[in-house]
């Protein structure tokens, strides 16, 4: 089985939530939150994570509007993610991240680890959700290619680019 070495990113104006996965590609986990200062200052932090975890691909959440369009924020995320991918010399994929911050808050509340003051924890968890969605989609695609007939769509299928609502 091929080792999966992906880094999930929840890119915001002030912070970037970062998530990694186990080598099997089954479970995504929040790793850290990088406080953005300048792109040049951000790069060494990403380089250290990429080197330590032997990362092979970046997966960035793309904040589509609820109408499924790329708004201003999504364009800003694309610019940052593309510059980052070039600087790190890694391929880049996007996944629809609508509602991931809300999902992250709900998850942390359920674990009794939520604080409205700890935005970094929400960003880390949102990055883990983004990466988990990518891993799940990757598994479904690989399963379909291999002829596995038990392909089940998640009940809250995101990443389709269609319209949707949070909650």
Image (cartoon, helix red, strand yellow):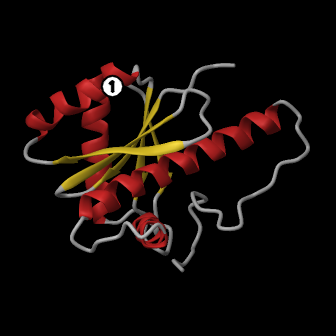
Q: Nearer the viewer, residue 165 or 118?
A: 118
Height in image: 139 above or below 114? above
Tell me what residue is drawn at x 74 percent, y 34 percent. Answer: 142
Q: Is residue 155 visible?
A: yes
Tell me what residue is drawn at x 46 percent, y 59 percent. Answer: 97
Q: Quadrant of residue 62?
A: bottom left
Q: Nearer the viewer, residue 96 or 161?
A: 96
Q: Nearer the viewer, residue 18 or 70?
A: 18
The residue carrying pointer 1 sits among few (fewer than 14), some (14 to 19) or many (20 or more) residues within 10 Å by Cα, namely: many
**Does residue 46 appear to the left or right of 31 in the view shown?**
left
Q: Position of residue 103 (x, y in %)?
A: 48, 68
Tell me what residue is drawn at x 14 percent, y 48 percent. Answer: 36
Q: Position of residue 148 (x, y in %)?
A: 88, 38
Q: Position of residue 59 (x, y in %)?
A: 44, 41
Q: Position of residue 127 (x, y in %)?
A: 40, 51
Name the quarter where the N terminus is drawn: top right
Q: Is residue 87 visible?
A: no
**Does residue 46 appear to the left or right of 2 in the view shown?**
left
Q: Quadrant of residue 100?
A: bottom left
Q: Secondary structure at mark 1?
A: helix
Height in image: 64 above or below 149? below
Name the quarter where the C terminus is drawn: bottom right
Residue with the mark numbered 1: 50
How many numbered dots are placed on residues in this image?
1
Tell me what residue is drawn at x 45 percent, y 50 percent. Answer: 128
């Amino acid at each position: 089985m091929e080792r999966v070495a992906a880094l999930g990113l929840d890119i915001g104006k002030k912070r970037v939530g970062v998530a990694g996965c186990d080598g099997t590609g089954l479970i995504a986990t929040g790793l850290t939150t990088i406080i953005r200062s300048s792109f040049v200052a951000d790069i060494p932090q990403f380089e250290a994570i990429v080197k330590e975890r032997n990362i092979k691909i970046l997966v960035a959440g793309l904040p589509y509007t609820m109408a499924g369009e790329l708004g201003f924020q999504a364009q800003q995320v694309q610019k940052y993610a593309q510059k980052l991918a070039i600087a790190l010399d890694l391929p880049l994929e996007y996944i629809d991240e609508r509602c991931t911050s809300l999902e992250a808050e709900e998850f942390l509340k359920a674990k009794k680890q939520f604080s409205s003051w700890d935005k970094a924890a929400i960003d880390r968890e949102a990055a883990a959700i983004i990466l988990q969605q990518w891993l799940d989609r990757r598994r479904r695609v690989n399963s379909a290619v291999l002829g596995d007939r038990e392909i089940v769509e998640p009940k809250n299928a995101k990443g389709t680019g269609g319209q949707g609502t949070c909650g």
